[in-house]
Image: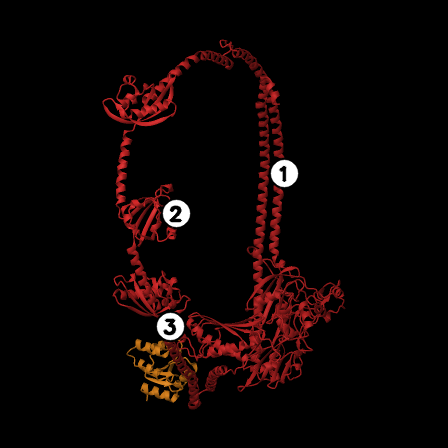
Amino acid sequence: MQFSLRRLGIRTKLITLFLAIKVIPLILLALIAWEGVSGLGKNVAAVADGWSVEVLGLAAGMGKSFTQAAERSLNDRAREELERLTTDTARAAADFLYDRDRDILLAAQLEPSKEVYRHLVANRTRGLIDPGKWKLADDGKAWIPVVAPPDPPPTILPDNPENRQDFHYRPPESALRTVQRPLYHEITFVGLDGREKIKVSTSTILSPALHDVSKRENTYCQAEGYFAELAKLRPGQIWVSEVIGPYVGSRIIGSATPEKATGLGISFAPEQEAYAGRENPVGKKFKGIIRWATPVVRNGKIVGYVTLALDHAHVMSFTDNLLPTPARYSSIADASDGNYAFMWDYLDRSIAHPRHHSIVGIDPASGDYAVPWLPADLYDNWQQSGQSLRQYLAGVPAFDRQSRDKKPAKALSQAGSIGLECRFLNFAPQCQGWHDLTKAGGSGSFLIQWSGVWKITTAASIPYRTGQYNKTPRGFGYVTIGANIDDFRQPAVRTGTRINARVDEFDQHMRRQQVGMHTRVTETMAGIARNLTLATLLMILAVIAIAVWLASVLTRRITTLTAGLQRIEQGDFSHRLAKTSTDEIGNLTDSLNRMAYSVELSFKRQEDYQLDALRKSEQQHRQVVDNASEGILVIQDSRIVLANPKFEQMTGFPLEELYKLSFLELIHPDDQDLVAAAEQHQLHGEAPAIRYSFRLARRDHPTLWVALSAVPIEWLGQAATLSFVTDVTESRRLDDHLKEVLAERETILEHSVVGIAFLNPEGRPLWANQAMGQLFGVDPAATLGTSLEPYFHSRDEYLDVGKLVLEAVQTRQPFTGEVNMRRAEGTSFWAHISGKAVNPDDLARGTVWVVSDISQRRELEEKLVRTTAEWGIILQSTLIGISYTSNRILRFVNKTFADMVGYEPEELIGQGSQIYYPDEKSWRQTGERAYPVLARGEAFAEEKRLKRKNGEIFWAQVYGMSIYPNDPAQGIIWTMIDISERRKAEEDILGALEQQRELNDLKSRFVSMTSHEFRTPLATILSSAELLRYYSDRLSKEEKDEMLGNIDTSVMRMTHMLDNILMIGRADAGQLEFKPAPVYVDVFCRKLVEEVAKAAMQGGNGFGRFHYACARSDEVVWLDEKLLQHVLGNLLSNAFKYSPNGQPVHFDIDSDDKEIRFRIADQGIGIPAEHLPRLFETFHRARNVGNISGTGLGMAIVKRALDLHGGKIRVESEVGCGSTFTVTLPKQLPTESAE
Amino acid sequence: MKTILVVEDDTFIRANLKLFLDLEGYRVIEAGNGAQGMAMALSENPDLILCDVMMPEVGGFEMLARLRAKLPWSEVPFIFLTASVEGDTREAGLALGADEFLTKPFNLVEVLDLIRRRTGDA
């Protein structure tokens, strides 16, 4: 390709080039223009699409958020209303029940006679809504009223147009027909022997005969045990029973239809199944009663009891006719559509339900509650346990992992035994939700998925708390209402649908707009593409034509030029080209002609240049020679044939004279032989280059020392020498001076007082001074070159020292040492020697040594060591610890001292003395006390606690004295004796005395306390007795009763005191026993709380301060009631006693599988932390009790009782904030012997 | 009619004293602790004060000390009722300026006798 391109003519190349640079860009431009236009079109479409998507998204998003907001606010409204309906219903029920309390109290006031009672019950009636008569629809799929409901009455419109906005009319609830029914089934008067004396019945549900109700079998469903409870009532107190009625079961759950019966494989007999509102309006109804009872008092004595049996239908009516839908009320309850209300008692049992088979009832055969609907697992486990149901249920946890995932026991569903006890209804998780909402007496709601639909369910406690209904915060029980969430969401759903429709419409419109725009863009693009292609093609044709014409013109003229140039190349420099035009080709012709002329000229100039260069080179050489700083001369046959101005200046002869002289004539006569000889050598070629010094004879000047170096050269074809001469007079003078200085130094060394010597590398003296000779008692000159071995005591010593010296020298170190040496006459002496290499880089230069006699110093030192050792033995062997410190750093300690503080002496030396102080502070304080004393020059003595290495603290008597009173820190001698034993004995005695004193103190406190505790009630007794004795005639009956009551209480108080003291005595003597038995914790604690609160009332404040909560109110635990009474009674009464400003007291009980916890918290004076460790000691009372009386026995009893019970107690207390005691008792499993 | 202030935290004893003194023709005002007693003593200007020693918050001794500090010139007879039998309690009370000590349990006759003597009714 490359080859063929080269062969192409310029013409072809030019045309190609034109096409390349013109046509390609044209096409490219057209393409770019097309690309841009089409990109613009697409962009416009894409942007428009993006806008419409965004707008649509915005519209849809706004619609969604409007719908959600509306839905949420409507939901909140609806929930609020539903919750309110629930609490209103619960309150109405409670009010109704309280009215029954008033009825029974009224009944107690009445004369017990049949006439009076009849009058009472006859006046107590209340309207119940009549569900009417119902029949099975013709298709057999639903129940319908026999009498069709009347058409709705005409609606009413506003008369005034200004009231037209949202005018909402609701017709009267005339569809609900009420029937007056007696409230009570019966009223009875029961004698103290349990026999009914008077009975007035309003129905036949209960037996009209008079019975002995102390026997359960004579009561309704054999289930009423009220007579046993009546004996506990005081005048004015009321007993209220639970809901009692025979259980009505149903094998059909849901609408009772023939189809359903067939599906279950049973015969269709709706009258045999339980009533279930609209689902089974002809079924058997639940017939329950609630009995009220109270003592009847005549002449201050209880003469019997009056009871009223409430028809439970009245209670059920509160929820049965309630509808949580716009319909509001219903003549008949309906559980089928998910909108209905229930009622549960305080133990979470169903007592009112549209389906009567859900209401718990009694099995009249046994008098026990019928088996409720149980989850399959629980039912199976019960069946396998072999226990009775209630026995078994007492041992399983309530609300055990309730979940929709669990299934009911089939056997129970089939048997139709499906009463609802929430605690075991584990396949209905909402049970626990209701329980949680009401466990503190409150109300609320939550959402739950039930039977596949979301439902809202509410619960509200029924605040009725008479008698046993005061056991839990939920009072009588609770009302729950369930509603299908979709029903009350309807307005929100409608709003959402409308908004979505608008959004869809808008979406359609936007899409139409979009399609139109896409079409317009596509049409415009097609037009542009057509025009662009046409224009490009026309331009390409024009470019090709121009290219062909231009190329032809240019090529012709260049061919002419090429021919002319070929002639010039061939050497015809005088040839010139013909110029035919004045354009660029004409200019090129001119340039080529000028170039031919220049080439011609340059050949002529070449020769002139070469001659000129030669002349310049010679001149440069001449300049070097003339300006050299050395004399330069050339000698041939002893004659100077060339000399430079410097040499002329050195000799003082002018040049022309020099050239006439023989070279030897310029040499000092004494040196002429030397020079002549050298010259001869050189000339004979024995030394190619030589250098020597001689004196130059000069004209009219003293001789000059010069150095000459010469080399043989050839000069004008013959041998000669080229010599360079330098003036060396000054350097000769410096040499002489150096020699003098060296001589002086040698004299100094020679006469130095210390011995100085130079040794050769073999260690033999090269030179030694006078002093060295005197040290060793020899003539220095005699030792030169001899071995030094005789000056050592043995050959080994000589070799040892030699080895050390060699090592030092080889490592370029100086050697110093103290060596015992021998004089020539045989005596020895200690010498300090130091030596180093003369030149560390060249060991062959030998070594230089300095030696001095140190015998005297060595002798003193040895003596000192001996003396120190003697003193050391004395110091080390004493039994007293001795140390020496300077600036509180240990400089010396003896062994005894080190042993005392438990260290090795070496560990202590150099350490600060704080090492054996218990802490930094005591170390610093010792210093502050000691230095003023030591500074006066006096001894410092002290007994103090010090610390051994192992941390042990010991007592030491320390005695210190400074050697430098002006600056005592500089040096102090300390002696120390260990006095731990003595101190310990002293402390033991003091401790025993303190204990004795405390014991006496405790005893006298106890005596004064018990005296106070007995004398106060005694004062009440005595003064009451006196009042009764002296003023009996002036006192009212009530005042006298009160006096006697006061005496009773005071005697009880003293008895309690005595009990406490005896209890402590018995506990200390090991006579207390632990006898566990099953205890109803809640019942037991409530009783205890009542007692303690009553006692506290005597001081003016009791109930109302108490906040009591028991997490599992029906729990039975094996406990020793007596011990527990001591523990909790003392803690509770303390909580009141030590909260003098009436602060609240909290008493909470909770438990798990293993243990039960009682927590008693007050906000009283609290217990100071330093008293906590002694809290449980007998007679110990904290200092902040002030004037609050007490024996100091309570907590001691608590502790002893707890120990027996295997329990634990934890105390948290802060002074001024209160105390919290937590008692934890293990749940005792019943043992064989205990049963 | 003479006014007697009874300061006593034990409600039984206080009630008995009130009933008794009412019957004996005195006007009785009551207080449950030293602080209340102090306020009553200042506002009601009683003719005699019967006061317990050991009471919550402000005790009898403190009340007496406050009273003597507030009204140093007051000569209202001050009688302590105490359940303590220790001699030094009695001495400390008398040193504070108490007029008499009655030890619990006390005879009402004895109380009446003392009140009459101290108020000049005897």
Seen from this angle, which residue lies furthest left? A700
Left or right of residue A1014: residue A418 = right
The amino acid type of the residue labelled 3 equals: Ser
Residue under numbered circle 2? A806
- Discs 3, 2: same chain: yes
Secondary element at image label 2: helix
Give whichever of discs 1 and 2 has the lower sequence position: 1
Secondary element at image label 1: helix
Q: Chain of mark 2?
A: A
Q: Which chain is red?
A: A
Closer to us: mark 1 or mark 2? 2
Q: Chain of mark 1?
A: A
- What residue sits 29% from the left and 31% below the top? A731
Left or right of residue A183: residue A1003 = left
Q: Chain of mark 3?
A: A
The amino acid type of the residue labelled 2 equals: Leu
Crowding around mark 1 (Cα neighbors within 10 Å: few <14, some 14 to 19, many 20+) is few
Front position in the image: A553 or A334: A553
* Distance of label 1 from label 3 (alpha carbons): 109 Å
Residue under numbered circle 1? A515
